[in-house]
Image (cartoon, helix red, strand yellow):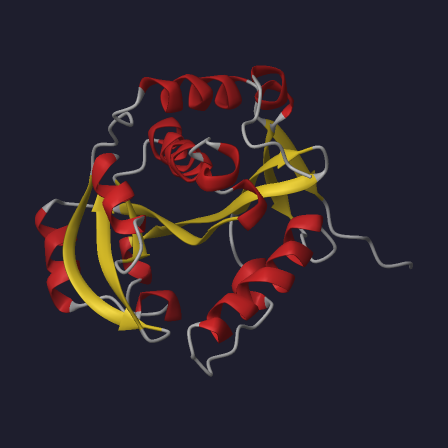
Amino acid sequence: MMRTRMSEADLKQVEYVIATGDLKNHRLFHYWLERWPSLVKSLGSDETLEPSEFLKQDMATALIFQGKVVGLHLLKEYSNGAYDDDAYFLPYSTKFFCNLEKRKVKRVMAQQYFIVDDEFSVSKTLVNFGAIIASLSLRHQIDRGIDATITLARADIPVTSLGLKLGFEEIDRTEMHNVPVSMLACFEPKPHPKEDVNRWVDYYWERRMFEAIEPLKKAA
């Protein structure tokens, strides 16, 4: 059973993993396949998710505790020339793209498929892993010098409000999977208002672990 509160020692065991490359056999891909489609179904949506939605990402990032996935976030970089060609951008509005153009955005990082496992929710651990994961994702924007991070965030639960705390701006709204979502863009990431969150963001970022998976070579 998970403790009511994770201790300092427990939190120091959590690892921030950044997986790239051929991820079709990676544990994070299998976790996504197990969790995300059922979440979409629970919203009353009949939309299906193709494995390619995960596999086309630049990186899968996750916090891991004793072999268990605490939370997952997928990240992909695009140039502004991809807006008309990639299906990811279909839900975004003309208003949204005009805002990016006005800000002279050339490169964006899309955050997709954000999830914190129920076992590690704030109510069970008293740790805001959602805020930690989201903050870690924005570190990639800063680290790579990307003009803006964009995302579609659920507005019926505190995902949009979390984004606003971290420097995102709500530019427009739409609906996906039967729930309202905000079109968010972050041009200048901000630290979370709670210093305890930022302390662990710093801790995990400094100790981040890279898993680069090379595709298997076919036998000659």
The vertical placement of 50 against 79, above or below, is below
Q: Residue at x 57, y 67 (%)?
A: 52
Q: Is residue 78 visible?
A: yes
Q: Residue furthest left?
A: 102
Image coordinates for residue 9, horizontal then vertical, percent: 62, 16
Q: Nearer the viewer, residue 109 or 67?
A: 67
Quadrant where the C terminus sits is bottom right
The picture quadrant where one finds residue 132 is top left
Q: Is residue 129 left or right of residue 179?
A: right
Q: Residue at x 32, y 18 (%)?
A: 195
Q: Is residue 153 left or right of residue 29?
A: left
Image coordinates for residue 68, horizontal then vertical, percent: 68, 41
Quadrant where the N terminus sits is top right
Q: Residue at x 52, y 78 (%)?
A: 48
The vertical placement of 133 against 150, above or below, is above
Q: Is residue 170 left or right of residue 90?
A: left
Q: Is residue 57 left or right of residue 17?
A: left
Q: Residue furthest bottom?
A: 46
The vertical placement of 47 against 88, above or below, is below
The vertical placement of 151 against 162, above or below, is below
Image coordinates for residue 214, horizontal then vertical, percent: 72, 45
Q: Is residue 117 visible?
A: no
Number of marks present in the image shown: 0
Image coordinates for residue 168, horizontal then vertical, percent: 21, 42
